[in-house]
Image: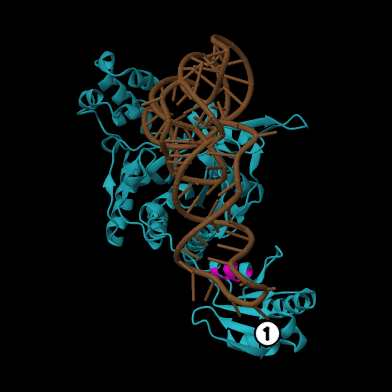
Chain colours: A cyan, B brown
RNA sequence: GUGGCUGUGGUGAAGUGGUCAACACGGCGGAUUGUGGCUCCGUUACUCGAGGGUUCAAGUCCCUCCAGUCACCCCA
């Protein structure tokens, strides 16, 4: 249909653009405070980047990418997330040669071919940050603090921070074996979803909403109990720092990030009033990604915040302030010579920075005043034949109804 | 990709096979021709998401598709 946009996309209409700009400005401000610089990468990349970066067996790559062949025969994909692209840019422009860690942020549209739902769209927007080059838990804590404080600055409460460690290539395979060993004997009793998860992602079975499955997985080993010494120390370090910062969080042994590149710290911030899609922020460490993309082994960590979900949350909490951008003055005119005068006055006032409007529909005097009233202007300047003849304007205060005949030059002093 | 619900004007909606598709809000115009907000009046759907079918007759029944919405999967 010519008259409707593609499924899962939204137009951001003038009435809501202001809120977007506000949220974006809060994001930019906090990034400046924390020392993160904006990075703008293309909206599409070589498909290969996402296959390698995100992981070929992830849902995103298997069924959610907008992929097409361009006229040169290249396979191109609209970015489904921005971490891989940030790492690509980091390598391409040799950002590793500068001050470490490299701290970046981005705000922009992402694309995933999902079925639309509350809080989920095919084109959606993320504010995300990436810190590449630092391995210690300090940077993990910094990033989590940045996310939490961004959401708090917007006024959101009822946020829940979930924290876990998903281990590293040394300890995760061992854990996976251990978990599968535990679940294997009861596999037949799990729901069909869980049975299919067994091979693909057994950790997901701990997360099943089915109460039967939940009781079956009681007592299963937790990743956090099977971490190698290095991962354990790192995980403890992150918690210590969060404690020191007074940030409350819940350890969630079932928290798993869906993308292959995550290691160690995984976190998520939930805003439960949103319904099923309650994750407002998701992030974690990806120590293997830079090497996977062809660089030297380099640690990294980042998060992404879903802006649509943030806006939904702001709406739920009624934190969206109405902004007044009503005109300061509406110029009413009647007759051709008066119109010329009115137009000149309008230009003059706009040059001086006042918000001014006039009629563009050849309305009658009465209709112009009705319109001015609807626009909730404070003043109306009336220029008819009489006023035009003496080069003056009838300035009317719309609240008191009082009006006086004054020179054009006086108008801006009265506003 | 799977399932539930929904689809009437700019908006919210009545309408449960048969005269001009209620009503409310909004928009536009007007109420002796140079003055708004209140009130009153007029006007605003060759058409009921799209396309087929059943019927003498369909917004009302059937099918297909599309879209919205919520949930699963997954995720921001």
Which residue lies at the image location 32% right of the left edge and 42% below the top edge? A164
Check the picture and name the quadrant holding the C terminus of chain A: bottom right
Image location (x, y in percent) of residue A211: 23, 26
Say whether residue A370 is magenta: yes
Q: Is residue A58 left or right of residue A406?
A: left
Magenta stretch, residue numbers: A368-373
On screen, residue A27 versus residue A270, left or right, reads right
Please tell me which residue is depicted at 31% across the width and 31% down the height of the picture: A207
Residue of label 1: A393
Above or below, A167 relative to A16 = above
Quadrant in the picture for the N terminus of chain A: top right
**A228 in the magenta segment:** no
Residue A222, given in percent of the width and then of the height, sits at 27, 33
Residue drawn 56% across and 67% down? A375
- What is the chief secondary structure element of the magenta stretch? helix
Q: Give coordinates of residue A401: x percent, y percent.
A: 52, 81
């Amino acid at each position: 249909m010519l008259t409707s946009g593609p499924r899962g996309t939204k137009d951001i209409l003038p009435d809501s653009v202001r809120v977007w700009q506000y949220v974006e400005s809060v994001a930019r401000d906090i990034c400046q405070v924390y020392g993160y610089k904006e990075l703008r990468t293309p909206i599409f990349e070589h498909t290969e980047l996402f296959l390698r970066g995100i992981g070929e067996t992830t849902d995103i790559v298997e069924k959610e990418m907008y992929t097409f062949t361009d006229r040169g025969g290249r396979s191109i994909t609209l970015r489904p997330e921005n971490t891989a692209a940030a790492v690509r840019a980091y390598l391409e422009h040799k950002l590793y040669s500068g001050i470490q860690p490299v701290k970046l942020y981005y705000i922009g549209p992402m694309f995933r071919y999902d079925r639309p739902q509350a809080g989920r769209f095919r084109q959606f927007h993320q504010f995300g940050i990436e810190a590449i080059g630092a391995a210690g838990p300090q940077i993990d804590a910094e990033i989590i603090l940045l996310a939490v404080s961004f959401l708090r600055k917007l006024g959101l409460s009822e946020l829940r921070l979930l924290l876990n460690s998903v281990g590293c290539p040394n300890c995760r395979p061992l854990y996976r074996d251990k978990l599968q060993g535990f679940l294997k004997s009861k596999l037949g009793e799990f729901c069909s979803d869980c049975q299919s998860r067994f091979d693909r992602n057994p950790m997901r079975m701990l997360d099943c909403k089915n109460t039967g499955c939940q009781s079956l997985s009681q007592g299963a080993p937790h990743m956090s109990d099977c971490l190698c010494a290095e991962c354990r120390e790192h995980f403890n370090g992150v918690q210590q720092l969060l404690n020191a910062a007074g940030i409350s969080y819940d350890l969630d042994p079932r928290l798993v990030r869906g993308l292959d590149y995550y290691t160690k710290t995984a976190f998520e911030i939930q805003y439960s009033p949103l319904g099923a899609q309650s994750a407002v922020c998701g992030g974690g460490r990806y120590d293997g990604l830079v090497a996977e993309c062809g660089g030297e082994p380099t640690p990294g960590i980042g998060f992404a915040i879903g802006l649509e979900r943030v806006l939904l949350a702001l709406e739920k909490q009624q934190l969206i302030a109405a902004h007044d951008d009503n005109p300061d003055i509406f110029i009413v005119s009647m007759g051709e010579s008066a119109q010329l005068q009115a137009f000149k006055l309008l230009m003059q006032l706009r040059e001086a920075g006042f918000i001014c409007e006039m009629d563009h529909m050849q309305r009658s005097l009465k209709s112009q005043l009705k319109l001015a009233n609807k626009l909730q202007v404070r003043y109306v300047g009336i220029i008819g034949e009489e006023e035009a003849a003496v080069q003056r304007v009838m300035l009317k205060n719309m609240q008191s109804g009082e009006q006086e005949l004054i020179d054009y030059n006086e108008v801006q002093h009265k506003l």
